[in-house]
């Protein structure tokens, strides 16, 4: 690819970068002591004055940034999908528990008290016949 095409691609792809990445592109230009002008609107660089090796370096950095944006977007979409699945599962579980709770019969507090009283009022009968036959077992550990 010739220098003019490379400059056009760089110019078109710079719009996809955020401010930090644009600063890194400027650092590449600044470190190589290329000419640039600065005014109230920002930094102005004439790409046709820059060496082709440095243009390739800038273009490779821009491609790296775009690929990393794509990977981050894929990861965020994956996380959002997982989050949606978890939220939907929670909603389904909540709906199921609501249905189960609706189907349960309601027991009055008086009935609960009566059942509790009945449960603890039973007498436990212990058969003493077998009480003497229980002995401690000795285990052999090898």
Image (tube, rainbow, N blue to C red):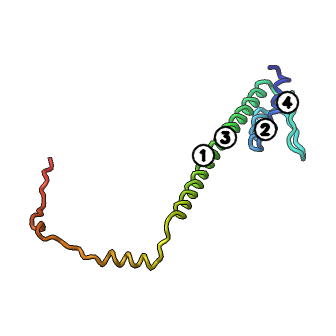
Tell me which residue sits at (76%, 31%) in the image: 58
On screen, residue 89 versus residue 134, left or right, reads right
On screen, residue 41 versus residue 71, left or right, reads right
Label 2 residue SS? helix
Q: Which circle's residue, 2 or 3, is located before the other in the chain?
A: 2
Q: Are marks 3 and 1 in contact (CB under 8 Å)?
A: no
Q: CA distance from mark 1 to mark 4?
A: 44 Å
Viewer-nearest of labels 4 and 3?
3
Label 3 residue SS? helix
On screen, residue 27 versus residue 132, left or right, reads right
Viewer-nearest of labels 4 and 2?
2
Viewer-nearest of labels 3 and 1?
1
Q: Which circle's residue, 1 or 2, is located before the other in the chain?
A: 2
Task: Pick the quarter of the image with the N terminus.
Answer: top right
Label 4 residue SS? helix
Using the rendered view, name the quadrant where residue 130 is placed: bottom left
| Along the viewing direction, whichever of 53 and 90 lies nearer the viewer | 90
Residue 60: give x, y in percent of width and height.
72, 29
Q: Which circle's residue, 4 or 3, is located before the other in the chain?
A: 4
Residue at label 2?
16
Using the rendered view, name the quadrant where residue 110 is placed: bottom left
Q: CA distance from mark 2 to mark 3?
A: 14 Å
> On screen, 115 above or below 103?
below
Viewer-nearest of labels 1 and 4?
1
Viewer-nearest of labels 2 and 3?
3
Q: Which circle's residue, 4 or 2, is located before the other in the chain?
A: 2
Q: Are marks 1 and 4 in contact (CB under 8 Å)?
A: no
> On screen, 120 above or below 58?
below
Tell me which residue sits at (60%, 55%) in the image: 91
Residue at label 4?
47
| Along the viewing direction, whichever of 75 and 47 lies nearer the viewer | 75
Q: CA distance from mark 1 to mark 2?
A: 28 Å
């Amino acid at each position: 690819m010739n220098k003019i095409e490379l400059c056009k691609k760089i110019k078109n792809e710079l719009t996809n970068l955020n401010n930090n990445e644009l600063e890194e592109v400027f650092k590449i230009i600044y470190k190589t002591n290329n000419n640039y002008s600065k005014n109230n609107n920002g930094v102005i660089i004439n790409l046709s004055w820059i060496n082709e090796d440095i243009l390739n370096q800038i273009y490779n950095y821009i491609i790296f940034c775009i690929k990393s944006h794509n990977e981050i977007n894929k990861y965020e979409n994956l996380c959002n999908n997982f989050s949606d699945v978890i939220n939907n599962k929670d909603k389904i579980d909540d709906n199921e528990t609501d249905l189960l709770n609706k189907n349960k019969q309601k027991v009055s507090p008086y009935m609960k008290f009566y059942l509790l009283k009945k449960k603890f009022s039973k007498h436990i009968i212990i058969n003493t016949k077998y009480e003497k036959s229980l002995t401690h077992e000795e285990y052999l550990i090898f």
